Amino acid sequence: MKNVLLFLVILIATAATVLRVRHGGGEPYPDLTGTPLLSADALEEVLTYPEPIGNVAVSSDGRIFFTVHPESRPRGNKLLEYIDGASVPFPTLGQQSKLFDTPIGIAIDRLDRLWTIDHGNHGTRSARIIAIDLANGEVLRDQKFDESIAPAGSFLQDLQISADGRTIVIADASFWRKSPALIIYDVESGEARRVLEGHPSVTAENYLIRTHDKDMEFLGGIVSLRGGVDGIALGPEWLYYAALNGSGLFRVRLKDLTNKSLPPSQLATRVERYSEKPLSDGLSVDIAGSVFVTDVEHSAIFKVDIDDGLSTLIQSPRIRWPDALSFGPDGYLYVADSALPELILRSSAHIQAEGPYRIFRFQAGSLGVPGQ
């Protein structure tokens, strides 16, 4: 009996050590924030919701859609539209349970189709891509990805659509599998490909996220929140992307990503490190090619200009974890505040007590990409 107990102790200690080496630890990241270009008073509260918010997407005519963050383990509605002061299920209440498992990323294309990516509980179930007609709520696409695209341990969590509506790029942050990649999805054929898997530009670096005096580590420090490619932003020519725990903002031409005949080794050489950045979640891009980057450690949004470089655009302690970004009409940039530190491995009672959860917006001084 003693030998069995000793064996179990050794086994548990070994497993904890392996987990910490693979998933734990990390170094602090420097604070890149400077004097914000905008006052914190420019930040407007758009809506509150009792459950944590995942992503936000705003249509060209100002309709606001958002997902409930899957890490909060929601049991009710998972995709909603904000109408006249109320958050209502989209599509209907009856369709929610049939359509959605763990949806998070949403985006709207030029044909007014709302696309959402569902990671299938970190790839333990089938990941799905779904398209819904905004005019009538009709489901236009409901497609599952096999294990070659969304293997166990993957985390397909953000997607962006090209201006012509033909290509969708999906980010796999791969928190558990540690094999992050971009996924290129052809809307017409329904074919998907993983590209740049394991490339340094999509891979997490050894940084420990600290936000609002909380280190994002769990289980006694055995596991840290460390994700690969997370935020993506797609302009007419370039895809901009970055790892959550990464120091660099990268870009690669869309035409290279969609070129099936381009060998992986050549595609890798066409990736450019565009700028330094904070530890970030969501990205967006405007007509002028300026890139907007959230700073999850310091409740801020940065702007990256090709001429002026990196600058702090706005900062406010009201934002607990600036997650997704979406341009709406009239130059407003919408920010989904997921308050992620209050979700991961937290009880339902804690999550409820930390509500409500919010979407904000502010005038970014520019317009989004046409057709998106």
Image (cartoon, helix red, strand yellow):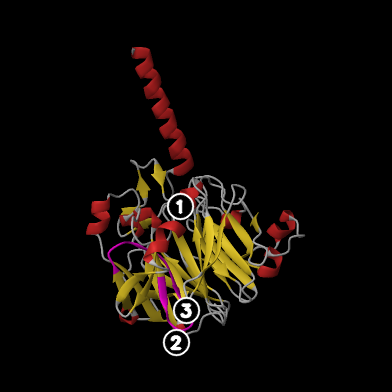
Q: Please say if the residues under marks 2 and 3 sit with CB atoms less than 8 Å apart.
A: no
Q: Callout 2, which amino acid?
A: Asp
**Horizontal and vertical percent position of residue 57:** 45, 72
SS category of the residue bearing label 2:
helix
The residue mark sitting in front, 3 or 1, is: 3
Q: Callout 1, which amino acid?
A: Tyr
Q: Earlier in the sequence, mark 3 or mark 1?
A: 3
Per the image, the residue denoted by label 3 is: 59
Q: Earlier in the sequence, mark 2 or mark 1?
A: 1
**Horizontal and vertical percent position of residue 159:** 53, 64
Per the image, the residue denoted by label 1 is: 207
Name the one closer to the observer, 328 or 240: 328
Q: Residue at x 37, y 23 (%)?
A: 9
- Is 276 magenta? The answer is no
Q: Furthest-right residue in view? A: 261
**Horizontal and vertical percent position of residue 107:** 50, 70
Q: Callout 3, which amino acid?
A: Ser
Which dot marks residue 365?
none
The residue mark sitting in front, 2 or 1, is: 2
Instruction: Bin the neighbour count of mark 3 within 10 Å (Cα to Cα): few under 14, some 14-19, many 20 and up.
Output: many
Q: Please say if the residues under marks 2 and 1 sit with CB atoms less than 8 Å apart.
A: no
For the C terminus, the quadrant is: bottom right
Span of residues in magenta: 49-65
Q: Is residue 280 visible?
A: no
SS category of the residue bearing label 1:
loop
Q: Is residue 86 visible?
A: yes
Q: Disc 3 versus disc 1: distance between alpha carbons?
A: 35 Å
